[in-house]
Image (cartoon, helix red, strand yellow):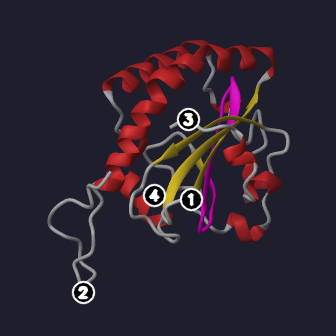
Amino acid sequence: MKLPLTAHTDRPWRIHEFTRDFRTEDVWSFRTPGAGPDDLPLMLEAMRADGGFAKQAPPVRFLFAVRWKLGALLGWDEQKAGLGKRVRPLRDRLPADLRETVDESGSAGTPFTPVYELRDESVRELANRTVHTIMHLGWVPTGDGGHELRMAVLVKPNGRFGRLYMAVIAPFRYLIVYPALTRQWERAWRNRPLPRPGGNSPMAGKGDRSV
């Protein structure tokens, strides 16, 4: 579900310390019924087990295939346009205690590079010739005593071209990409393995399917 930008900007996230020159583009929520305050790692693992960014609905795969093809033809995704080349990585702004919370090599299956991970925040970044993007995943209490996942997309467009690019892809994000991502991530939470009562091994069947 799409949320107002203040659902991200008004929360006391650490990310605000390092992204004052970025703008908050999108905020989206994902239902995780039955989740507790310490379950962000469980949600992230469920997302990885479900295929992460590598497993997308056919319309989303098609859109990204077109995007990567255009990027290859026009040089948008060349190494010299990425992190450490065209833009300074966000990781370079972090204190040592935050940089040590993730391994930069842990980006298999996704074009995003890990930045840091805390009890209630997980941050990744991506840069190319169009934009420098931060994906912030936050773990937020809900009114019913549970918790939910929230994704905020922070961007720094690369000049006028980057701003035009973001405007062109906006309808595709709202109508296709984010709704599909919502279905995928909420399904991953519902289908996560649950521990056996009184034990630590996963159940043979699927996880909690409440909605």
Circle 1: residue type: Trp
201 relative to 136, above or below: below
- The tag earlier along the polypeptide, 1 or 4, is 4
Q: Nearer the viewer, mark 1 or mark 4?
A: 1
Q: Nearer the viewer, mark 2 or mark 3?
A: 3
Residue farthest to the front, as pictured: 144
In front of the other: 149 or 164: 149
Q: Which residue is mark 2?
A: 198
204 relative to 5, above or below: below
Q: Which residue is mark 3?
A: 2
Q: Position of residue 75 (x, y in %)?
A: 62, 18
Is the magenta region chiefly helix, strand or loop? strand
Label 3, label 1: how far apart the Cα atoms are: 16 Å
Query: How would you rate the neighbour count of disc 4 (Cα within 10 Å): few for under 14, some for 14-19, many for 20 or more?
Result: some
Element under label 3?
A: loop
Query: How would you rate the neighbour count of disc 3 (Cα within 10 Å): few for under 14, some for 14-19, many for 20 or more?
Result: some
The numbered disc on residue 139 is 1
Label 1, label 2: how far apart the Cα atoms are: 27 Å
